[in-house]
Image: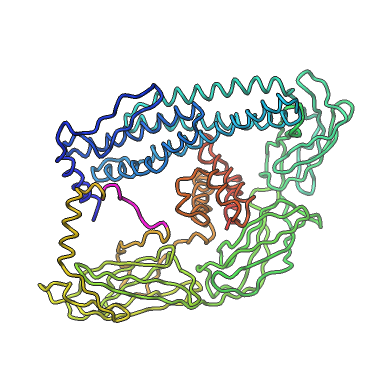
Amino acid sequence: MNRAVAIAFLLVALLAIPAGAALTPQAADNNTTTQHVDPDATNGNGDLDALSGVLERELASRLRESAIQISQGQYEQGRDLLGDEYSETLGKYVDVAGDTGNDGDGESFRRARTEQQQYAERVQEYNETRREYLEAKENGNERRARRLARELQRDARNVTQASRNVTRSYTVVENETGADLSVATNVTQNTTDEIQRQQADIRAAEFTPTTVTLDEYDESISFREPLSLTGRLTDENGTALADRRIRLRIERRSITTRTNETGAFSLAYRPVRLPTGTTAVRVAYVPDSTSVYLGSNATTNVSVSMVIPTVSLSTSTDRASYRDPVDASGEVTVDNAAVSDVPVVLTADGHVLARGTTGKNGSFSLSGRLPASVSTATEQLSVRVGGDDRAIGPASTNASFRVEPTATRLTVATQVGDTLDVTGRLETADGLSLSGQPVTVQVNGSRVATVRTNATGAYAASVPVPNASVAQVTAVYSGGGNLNGSEASTRLRIPARGDDASDFPVLGRNGEGSNTPSVLVLVGSLIVLALGGVGLFLAWGRVSADEGPISSAVEEPQSDSPDGAMETPADPFEPLTEPRSILEDDPTAAVERAYAAVRQRVGDASLESATHWEFYRAVEPTVSDADALDRLTRAYEAAAFSPEGIDATTAAEAIDAAEAVR
């Protein structure tokens, strides 16, 4: 039953409610709790626009009360208000907006929830760490207190950023819906201001500011001609931080050196990922976690020239079939000097199989799995490193490689009623599900539909009942890449027109009959009508979390031949081609899509509403590379919540990390 019918049922039920019977919110017990409006208890005027307004107010009410709970330290209560009931109300709102022709897709409410959950997590992190800090101070443990104070510096910055994001999302909701979120905005800002006041006191009590000064440096550099510079490290009063080991960071590399009696230091640095041409180089002082000093940095401009490295392979896979592991290892050098931290990509037939970076000794070891899209005509594996317009430029090497075909197996089953329903599953001969693959349905030799398999390899199509007494139904998978084609057929009897279809057995692929008495259908229909449609309304949009939706939408045939070429979308284990394709134009969107692919790949339905850090903590023990997941999560956080977004270089590194998470 479609949404329009469900809405009609709901409105009929609402019209049957006496005018005085509509539920009304009770007076609040105190000034911190907002009673929620029951979306199923409207004024009964049958107006979908009014119903949409009720749902908007309910969502805004939950956002307001959640903000109040967070400000009072009731973090779980604040998150619960944005949990399952919020999701159900949001689903209703989106459906009603769609059926009334409004533009509302719920994205502003969806983003407000995400950012408010993030804000709650950040505030909770700060306050919990602050409690630990105060306990350490009370116990006289100054080293622990100083380490926690440094963590609080980071936590306070995160709270400020999350506050900006959530209040900005409130403004978007207000502009799009007319809802009043001024209370939530004020409460959030007051909470943030209080945290900043607390942190200013802690910073002044625990730390001394520092200054990095750069004195002499090379203006033109390359990997062959490293940057050589000298500088000085002092405190806020100009007193040298003398005779001590210090850690400096340039680009992505940490360098440990030592100051002399005047606080002077020197270092050498070989650029790897810096852009060519005139580039700003930032030198940052990174104090130890228990140091009394704050970090500082200085920036200077240099001219960077490209150097082309040498790539050598030591081992590589020589043959593979679908989903088999494909490995390659080797090293990257320039004039026999190891090149560390340079990006490395393993490809076959132009498809990315794995990504990584070289280690300290210039070595790399990559491993991926062969996707369906790599053709059996492929003859080489390729490893490429570096990048255009970077200090370490592009270079590659190849190795012989053979792709072997994989047999597939297709099933088909049918049932006839008002339509002819065709279902089945596509998998390899070894039982691996094949998702995103096109399956063509033919009836009595004519092509009637093309559908795609879902995440479990299942497909479904509903087509018109043929004007014949017997139907031959054939499902065809034409194959592609390294997958062989397959097909399956079944015959079924078609009921004579005007006869009750339930009196005719329907023969599936196993020849088994099925009879359904029409009286059961009638009784079932009456029960549904008696429910007034409310249950249907609440159940909108729910699908099986285990198997995912099976698409019954019929694609228009692209050609008269069942062997016509079809574009195959990537499954969750395919390389992240789509995010990479938009990397340069929209790095923020690229990271968000790569992160979404990883959540689909390693998560499950129980984590659907989890924030990104909740998701991280839930799956971290089971993923293949927890460090990569951490890097991806932090990059997603910057992409999704920072007003500045994220640059293309950082986005590329995030997508590299996403490729590594299985």
At a point 65% along the width and 30% down the height, the residue shown is 132
| Residue range (magenta) | 536-545
Q: How is the image coloured?
A: rainbow
Where residue 181 sits, quadrant-wise, is top left
The furthest residue to the left: 498
Instruction: Check residue 539 for magenta coloring.
Output: yes
The C terminus sits in image quarter = bottom right
Q: Quadrant of residue 525?
A: bottom left
Does residue 212 appear in this view? no
Return the x and y of residue 592 as percentages of the image width and height. 50, 46
* Left or right: 248, with 274 as reference point: right
Query: Horizontal and vertical percent for residue 454?
Result: 40, 63
Q: Quadrant of the N terminus?
A: bottom left
Q: Residue furthest right?
A: 261
Report the front residue among 188 and 107.
Answer: 188
**Where does the image place residue 621, in percent across and percent down from the top left?**
61, 53
Using the image, determine if residue 138 lies above or below residue 412. Answer: above
Report the residue at 81% width, 54% height from top. 337
In the shown orientation, is residue 387 left or right of residue 321? right
Q: Position of residue 393 (x, y in %)?
A: 68, 53
Residue sitting at x 37%, y 70%: 439
Question: Position of 613 compared to 509: left or right?
Answer: right
Compare residues 621 and 553 and report the one nearer the observer: 621
- Asked if residue 258 shows in the view, the reply is yes
Up-down: is 55 above or below 234?
below
- On screen, 399 above or below 196? below
Q: Nearer the viewer, residue 428 or 557?
A: 428
Against 641, is 374 above or below?
A: below
In the image, is residue 409 part of the stretch drawn in magenta? no
Please identify the dominant SS of the magenta region: loop
